[in-house]
Image (cartoon, rainbow, N blue to C red):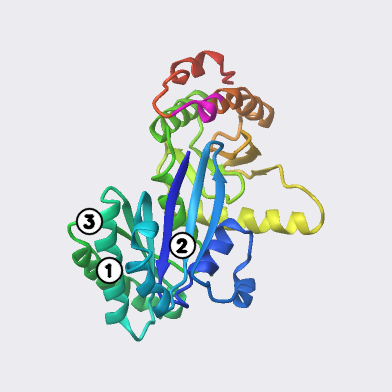
Amino acid sequence: MKKKVLLMGKSGSGKTSMRSIIFANYIARDTRRLGATIDVEHSHVRFLGNLVLNLWDCGGQEAFMENYFASQRDNIFRNVEVLIYVFDVESHELEKDMHYYQSCLEAILQNSPEAKVFCLVHKMDLVQDDQRDLVFKEREEDLKRLSKPLNCTCFATSIWDETLYKAWSNIVYQLIPNVQQLESMLANFANIIDADEVLLFERATFLVISHCERKPHSDVHRFEKISNIIKQFKLSCSKLAATFQSMEVRNSCFSAYIDLFTSNTYIMVVMSDTTIPSAATLINIKNARKHFEKLERSEPGHHTIGASISSHMQAE
């Protein structure tokens, strides 16, 4: 199943840097050596088995942008599932940026009216800490107003922190087939083993694709921070010719397990009951694996296994 994703925005806004970090295992400082995108760069990213993101990274120089809206209009904007438009928060040509954004929206309305629209207000690390919320909220209001009759979802992002993972996790979540069934199964699994939280990460990108939370947590950015930390750790392992497979963290307050799960995911289980032995949780993860693998292989809309999971789990 291929899904077309358009990545657009002015040249220098940071599109290729974020794509390289999320999908090509770059670290933030290494993106400085990336050159400007020429015309359109296509990449096919296999994401969760049968789902392939057909990512079109569109160069943002004026000549290219004008060409997209003229001679390439149908080719670029037809069959789009998601439009991601990136704005440089410090751009000195905001009016021109908004003009090109509205031109994109007009082309999307004509060719792919069902497409989902996301706006990333990028390079937020360049804005003073105490001004970030205000700057983002003002920009978000403007973008939502300009986007009508389409709805847009806005994120404040930076390649230097977890905000990039939050935005892309939310975007990819919209594209995953069977996502409701996946979340239902995670909730079932969490209840059976009495976990505080269970998260699924996509194996290559470490984006959070689904989670179940049974106890409230004070840090709303914890998922993205974990994505960022583990991905950096995986990269460090690969430099030493080692493979990251699993890890366990235990203290007096909680136990957390990250383990290779299905062929396309890692799982994270957080338990506040520290009396439960590690072996019991690891057996439960192992027993759940085959049920989630069946779901990955099934077609969207096939509800074949959700009810059977509890009878096959070994809860301690």
Sooner in the amino-acid sequence: mark 2 or mark 3:
3
**Type of amino acid under label 3:** Leu
Q: Nearer the viewer, residue 95 or 54?
A: 54
Predominant secondary structure, magenta span: helix
* Residue located 45% across and 21% down the image: 306
Numbered disc in front, either 1 or 2: 1
The label number, if any, that marks residue 150 in the structure image? 3
**Does residue 104 lie above or below 302 as drawn?**
below
Classify 240 as above or below 156. Answer: above
Are the residues at dot 2 and dot 3 in contact (C-beta closer than 8 Å)?
no
Give the Cα distance between marks 1 and 2: 27 Å
Q: Earlier in the sequence, mark 1 or mark 3?
A: 1
Who's the residue at 39% across and 26% down the image? 301
Q: Amino acid at mark 1?
A: Ser
Q: With 56 as the anchor, is 46 left or right in this view? A: right
Callout 2: helix, strand or loop? Answer: helix
Give me the residue at 28% from left, 72% from top.
139
Query: Which mark lies nearer to you, 1 or 3?
Result: 1
Q: Which residue is mark 1?
A: 103
Q: Secondary structure at mark 1?
A: helix
Question: Label 2, label 3: how many angstroms apart (C-alpha)?
Answer: 24 Å
Neighbourhood count class around disc 3 (C-alpha, 10 Å): few under 14, some 14–19, many 20 upward: some
**Residue tagged 2:** 163
Give the magenta part as a residue range: 294-299
As shown in the figure, which amino acid type bears the numbered disc 2? Thr
User: Which residue is at 52% across, 65% downward?
Assistant: 18
Q: In front: 242, or 264?
A: 264
